[in-house]
Image (cartoon, grey):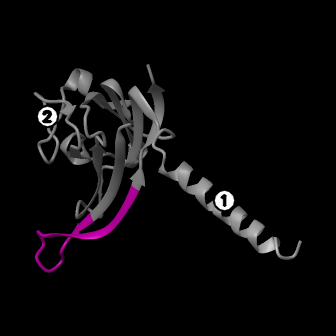
């Protein structure tokens, strides 16, 4: 039995190694759907007498290389749950990189779009923050779900120049899928 032990251990190690890679290499376990809803946190306010701005940059990605994703609706909520902005009634905003805008709400395959919170919202008092962004999306067939992230940034006026904004802090957060329709 002693001479068989190394062979058994080697076989067991090979089996465990191969079983781990087969699971991690499979994309079938990734979430795919025809429509969904994603929620992101964020902030949008001024402080220190208006010399510091805190805002969120929302980045959304279509990770499909073959299928477009339509951004159906963008809804911002304040801390109390009240609607601050709804693209269904206010119109679709223009994104920073002009990938999406009032006349185009479709993310083509492999496209990424960015939106600054201050381009859509007023600066909020303390009782209305933080905020949430809800992104409702759909696709003509099942795709890997919409990827979204929010980066909260704080910038302050440079005391030397008075005008230039210098970055003081940054914090990235993944957004969360809260609803999926697979069929």
Identify which residue, 29 or 92, lies in the foreground: 29
Front position among marks 1 and 2? 1
Q: Residue at x 11, y 42 (%)?
A: 98
Q: Position of residue 31 (x, y in %)?
A: 46, 36
Q: Which mark is residue 123?
A: none
Question: Where, by quadrant of the figure, is residue 168 drawn?
Answer: bottom left
Examine the image and state in which quarter residue 109 appears. top left
Percent of width and height locating residue 45: 30, 52
Tell me, yes or no, if residue 28 can be seen here: yes
Quarter the N terminus occupies: bottom right
Q: Which mark is residue 16?
A: 1
Q: Is residue 129 something that shows in the picture?
A: no
**Residue at (47% x, 40% y) in the render:** 30
Segment tinted magenta in the rendering:
155-172
- Residue sitting at x 54%, y 56%: 21
Q: Position of residue 175 (x, y in %)?
A: 42, 45
Among the two numbered marks 1 and 2 on one chain, the one whose residue lies closer to the N terminus: 1
The answer to whether residue 113 is magenta is no
Query: Marks 1 and 2, how far apart in space?
Result: 49 Å
- Judge from the rendering whether residue 22 lies leftward or rightward of residue 131; answer left or right: right
Q: Give the main secondary structure, helix, strand or loop, of the magenta stretch.
A: strand
Q: Please name the residue that numbered disc 2 is placed on.
A: 101
User: Which secondary structure lies at badge 2?
Assistant: loop
In terms of secondary structure, where does tag 1 sit?
helix
């Amino acid at each position: 039995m002693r001479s068989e032990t190394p062979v058994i251990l080697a076989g067991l190690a090979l089996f465990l190694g191969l079983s781990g890679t087969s699971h991690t290499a499979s994309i079938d376990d990734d979430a795919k759907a025809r429509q969904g809803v994603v929620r992101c946190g964020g902030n949008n306010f001024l402080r220190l007498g208006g010399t510091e701005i805190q805002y969120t940059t929302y980045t959304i990605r279509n990770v499909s290389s073959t299928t477009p994703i339509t951004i159906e609706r963008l809804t911002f909520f304040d801390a109390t749950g009240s609607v601050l902005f709804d693209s269904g009634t206010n119109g679709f905003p223009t994104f920073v990189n002009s990938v999406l805008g009032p006349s185009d709400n479709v993310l083509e395959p492999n496209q990424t779009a960015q939106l600054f919170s201050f381009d859509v919202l007023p600066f909020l008092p303390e009782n209305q923050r933080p905020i949430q962004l809800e992104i409702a999306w759909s696709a003509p067939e099942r795709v890997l779900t919409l990827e979204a992230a929010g980066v909260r940034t704080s910038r302050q006026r440079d005391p030397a120049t008075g005008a230039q904004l210098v970055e003081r802090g940054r914090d990235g957060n993944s957004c969360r899928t809260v609803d999926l329709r697979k069929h």
